[in-house]
C-alpha cells in the first residue's frame, strides 16, 4: 500500500484567526506577566530582560520554521511523531514525542496551578475554604484546588466533545487578552508610568 492511500484528509475547522489564537494562547501564560517583574527585572535589569525575551523569541521562531518545513514535506496528517518519523526515522520520532509529552505535562501543570490565583482574584477569596497548605509562602486552600480541578476537567471535556466551539471561545479570549494588553500598555505609556 503506498503512502497516498494511507493519507487522511485534513479536518479543517480552524480559520487563520483561530490558528493565531491557539498559538498566542499556547505562548502566553500567566508567567509572561508575572515573571518579568518578579524574577527577571530584579536579577537582569531591563536590558537583560529584553535580551532574554528576544533570544527566546528567536528560538521559538526557529522551532516554528522547522515545524512548517516538516508539515510541508509530509504526505500525511499528524504531529511531531509523524513528521519526525518521516524525516528521521522511528527512534528520533520516539524521542521527540517523549520530550514533547514531558514539556506539555510541565506546562499544563504550571498553568493549571495558576488557576487558584485567578479564582482568588475573581471571587475575592470566596474559594479560600477548608484546610490549606503552604508552598513558597503562598497559602493554597482545598476549595481553590477543587475549583481549579473542576475548571481543568470542564475544559478537557469540551476538548473531547466540542472542539470547534471551544476553539472559537479560546480565539475570543486570546483577542480579548491581546486587546487588554495593548490598551493597558497604551494607557501606562501615555501617563509616563513605565520606569
Image (tube, grey):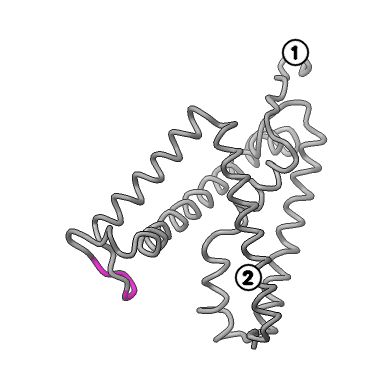
Residue depicted at 72% across the width and 61% down the height: 59
Closest to the observer: 76 or 137? Answer: 137
Binning the other alpha carbons within 10 Å of mark 2 as few (below 14), some (14 to 19) or many (20 upward) gives few
Q: Nearer the viewer, mark 2 or mark 1?
A: 2
Q: State whether residue 140 is above or below residue 79.
A: below
Residue 97 is situated, as x and y percent measured from the top left of the image, at 58, 42
Quarter that holds the C terminus: bottom right
**Residue positioned 78% across, 31% down in the render:** 74
Q: Quadrant of residue 48?
A: bottom right
Disc 1 is placed on an element classified as: helix
Q: What's the distance in space between the residues labelled 2 and 1, CA to CA?
A: 52 Å
Residue 60, given in percent of the width and then of the height, sits at 71, 58
Q: Position of residue 134 (x, y in %)?
A: 26, 69
> Residue 84: within the magenta?
no
Location of residue 44 in the rendering, given as x and y in whole percent from the top left corner: 61, 85
Q: Which residues are magenta?
A: 133-137
Q: Up-down: is 158 above or below 102? A: above
Most common SS among magenta residues: strand
Q: Residue at x 69, y 34 (%)?
A: 14
Mark 1 — residue?
Answer: 5
Q: Which residue is disc 2 drawn over? A: 184
**Quarter where residue 77 is shown:** top right
Horizontally, residue 30 falls left or right of residue 48, namely left
Amino acid at each position: 500500500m503506498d503512502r497516498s492511500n494511507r493519507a487522511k484528509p485534513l479536518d479543517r475547522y480552524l480559520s487563520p484567526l483561530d490558528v493565531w489564537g491557539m498559538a498566542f494562547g499556547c505562548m502566553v501564560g500567566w508567567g509572561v506577566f508575572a515573571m518579568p517583574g518578579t524574577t527577571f527585572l530584579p536579577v537582569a535589569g531591563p536590558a537583560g530582560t529584553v535580551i532574554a525575551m528576544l533570544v527566546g523569541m528567536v528560538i521559538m521562531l526557529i522551532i516554528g520554521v522547522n515545524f512548517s518545513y516538516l508539515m510541508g514535506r509530509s504526505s500525511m496528517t499528524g504531529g511531531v511523531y509523524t513528521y519526525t518519523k518521516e524525516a528521521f526515522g522511528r527512534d528520533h520520532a520516539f524521542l521527540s514525542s517523549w520530550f514533547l509529552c514531558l514539556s506539555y505535562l510541565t506546562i499544563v501543570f504550571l498553568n493549571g496551578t495558576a488557576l487558584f490565583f485567578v479564582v482568588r482574584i475573581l471571587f475575592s477569596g470566596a474559594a479560600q475554604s477548608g484546610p490549606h497548605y503552604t508552598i513558597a509562602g503562598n497559602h493554597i486552600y482545598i476549595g481553590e484546588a477543587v475549583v481549579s480541578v473542576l475548571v481543568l476537567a470542564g475544559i478537557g471535556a469540551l476538548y473531547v466533545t466540542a472542539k470547534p466551539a471551544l476553539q472559537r471561545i479560546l480565539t475570543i479570549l486570546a483577542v480579548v487578552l491581546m486587546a487588554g494588553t495593548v490598551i493597558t500598555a497604551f494607557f501606562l505609556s501615555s501617563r509616563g508610568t513605565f520606569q
